[in-house]
Image (spheres, rainbow, N blue to C red):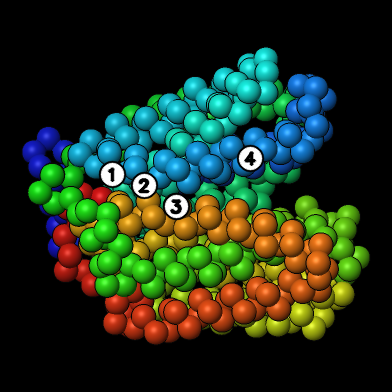
Amino acid sequence: MLLEESAGSAGPARLADPLPVSALLALAMTGFICIATETLPAGLLPQISAGMGISQAVAGQMITAYAVGSLLAAIPLSIATQGWRRRNVLLLTIIGFLVFNTVTALSPNIALTMAARFFAGVSAGLAWSLLAGYARRMVAPEQQGRAMAIAMVGTPIALSLGVPFGTWLGSLIGWRFAFGVMSALTLVLIAWVLMKVPDYPGQARSQRMPLRRVFTTPGVRPVLGVVMAWMLAHNILYSYVAPFVAPAGLAGQVDLVLLTFGTAALLGIWVTGRLVDRLLRRMVLLSLALFALTTLAFGFWAQSALVIYAGTVVWGLTFGGAATLLQTALADAAGDGADTALSMNVVAWNSAIAAGGIAGGFLLESRGVASFPWAVLVLVLLGLALAWSARVSGFPAGHRSSSRAVVAH
């Protein structure tokens, strides 16, 4: 099925067309910058604290301000920009990173820094609601899963390498220059988008679906439920990975554990890209089942370094494809409301990150790290039950439908 386009936009994608890898990698770099900008302060807290004369606890709120901006902006900005040409929206988000990372690098006081971080998060909220739909728009429906896998590859790279890279960069050239480097990367990305990423018209007013109608579309709520359960489980472990691996004698190898996770996640993205269009439901169920078994192993053998490393590999494999699987399922279920549904996904995903930090902190203080696997197991089994029950809408069996034209994602 060809993509429906208006005159003057990029031509339709045909089944035989090769994937537009360069354009998709530009989207992946946008995702990388989103995550790297978010996590950069985590590895630079001592330098930021000393440089600005504030406590590390206050400096840590730079991450909170970013997350709040993403949460508040994703849905309203996605709806407000539905009618805009897609490349203009993408460039707006990237320019936002350029401006607000530059302000962060030059800011003389914490108030301005927090404001810049908030608006950088606003840019991220809009970006995340756009990227998956943009990737789907570039290709025929039969290729959408693979296209999204490429467009999402920047996320695990940034998650596994963002904090150690930022820490190394900050210690080498200073934390302000580290944010300056992020701004320089956005300049490169702007040129890349202008040269390689095709433009598409926005959604006609007659095609736009109200927020409530999108939310009540069959399949949308089950997918969002799985997003919340899966990502909350993941973030309890990921946010507190350092204390979690300490009983296994790995307190000094947290960077290696995260590198193992990130490498496995990249492999997970590759596998998902190969299979998502044919086996989406099976892959979601298998990923959740394997994650559940991994948490079970963590629960019984958390003091074994071998189990921690082996489990981290499986955990990374299952997480790597999660964004592709869940966003593909959500966009398929929402149809013409895909952009709005994907903005809901941004809110759900970021809420799970915040809730994971809170829940993990509570468990750490009240029950200790030994409680993590069992709490995570309950959440993963909940996600598995939701995915299993959504066999008609949300996670249908068989090949993804290729009969739906992509009108304006």
SS of the residue at dot 3? helix
Instruction: Read off the residue under disc 2.
Output: 75
Kindly identify which numbered label has been placed on residue 323: none
Q: Say if 260 sits above or below 393 in the image.
A: above
Disc 1 residue type?
Ile
Disc 4 crowd, CA 10 A, few/some/many (<14, 14-19, 20+)? some
CA gap, disc 2 to disc 3? 8 Å
CA gap, disc 1 to disc 3? 13 Å
Q: Say if 114 sits above or below 357 in the image.
A: above
Are the residues tagged 2 and 3 within 8 Å (C-beta)? yes
Q: Nearer the viewer, residue 358 or 11?
A: 358
CA gap, disc 4 to disc 1? 25 Å
The answer to whether residue 200 is left or right of residue 104 is: left
Q: Nearer the viewer, residue 402 or 119?
A: 119
State the count of labels: 4
Disc 2 crowd, CA 10 A, few/some/many (<14, 14-19, 20+)? many
Are the residues tagged 2 and 1 within 8 Å (C-beta)? yes
CA gap, disc 4 to disc 2? 20 Å
Q: Say if 18 sits above or below 189 in the image.
A: below
CA gap, disc 2 to disc 1? 6 Å
CA gap, disc 4 to disc 3? 16 Å
Instruction: Read off the residue under disc 4.
Output: 63
Is residue 156 among the parts visible in the rendering?
yes
Kindly identify which numbered label has been placed on residue 346: 3
Are the residues tagged 1 and 3 within 8 Å (C-beta)? no
Q: Quadrant of residue 109?
A: top right
SS of the residue at dot 4? helix
Q: Position of residue 92 (x, y in %)?
A: 37, 30
Is residue 131 among the parts visible in the rendering?
no
Q: Quadrant of residue 366?
A: bottom right
